[in-house]
Image (cartoon, helix red, strand yellow):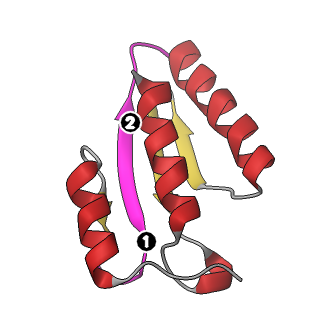
Amino acid sequence: MRDRLTDYERDVLLAELADWTLMEHREAIQKEFRFKSFNEAFGFMTRSALLAEKIDHHPEWSNVYNRVDVVLTTHSANGLTELDARMARAMNKFAE
């Protein structure tokens, strides 16, 4: 099991991550990504999926045309861990 981030670590992470927000009723972070086209959105999801498989940490997400809505949390820890931080940082880079 992964260790959950402390409240302080979570706050530092959210200050670092552009446009990620803490969900209101659960220990998770969320972000909406928008792209120019479905093809760009799908490419983003593909890059993210490859990393998710590599680190064995999979996002909750949905895709409609050029939009990808993402929720990150570590289910086994019932909250946020460094894996969520790693995925969020990588997703921000993939979206650039």
Question: Could you tell me which secondary element the residue under label 1 belongs to?
Answer: loop
Q: Which residue is label 2 attached to?
A: 33
Quick check: 62 above or below 7?
Answer: above
Residue 23 appears in the picture as rendered: no
Marks 1 & 2, CB-CB < 8 Å contact = no
Q: Nearer the viewer, residue 13 or 39?
A: 13
Which residue is found at the position 26% from the left and 78% from the top?
A: 8
Q: Is residue 2 magenta?
A: no
Q: Which residue is mark 1?
A: 28
Check disc 1 and give the amino acid type. Ala
Discs 1/2, front? 1
Q: Quadrant of residue 2?
A: bottom right
Residue 20 position, x and y percent, is: 30, 53
Gap in angstroms between the C-alphas marked 1 and 2: 16 Å
Residue at x 52% of width, y 60% of height:
84
**Given the image, on which type of amino acid does mark 2 rest?**
Phe
- Of the image marks 1 and 2, the number of the one nearer the N terminus: 1
Question: How many badges with numbers are in the image?
Answer: 2
Q: Secondary structure at mark 2?
A: strand
Give the side of residue 94 with respect to residue 47, left or right: left
* Residue 31 location (% of width, % of height): 36, 49
Residue range of the region highlighted in magenta in the rendering: 23-37
Front residue of 70 and 7: 7
User: x, y (%) of residue 77?
Assistant: 61, 84
Is 30 contained in the magenta span? Answer: yes
Q: Quadrant of the N terminus?
A: bottom right
Q: How many other residues sit within 10 Å of disc 1, few (<14), some (14-19) or many (≥20)?
A: many
Q: Nearer the viewer, residue 67 or 16?
A: 16
In the rendered image, the residue lying farthest to the left is 15
Q: Residue at x 44, y 26 (%)?
A: 95
Question: Which quadrant, please, contains the C terminus?
Answer: top left
Q: What predominant SS class does the magenta segment belong to? A: loop
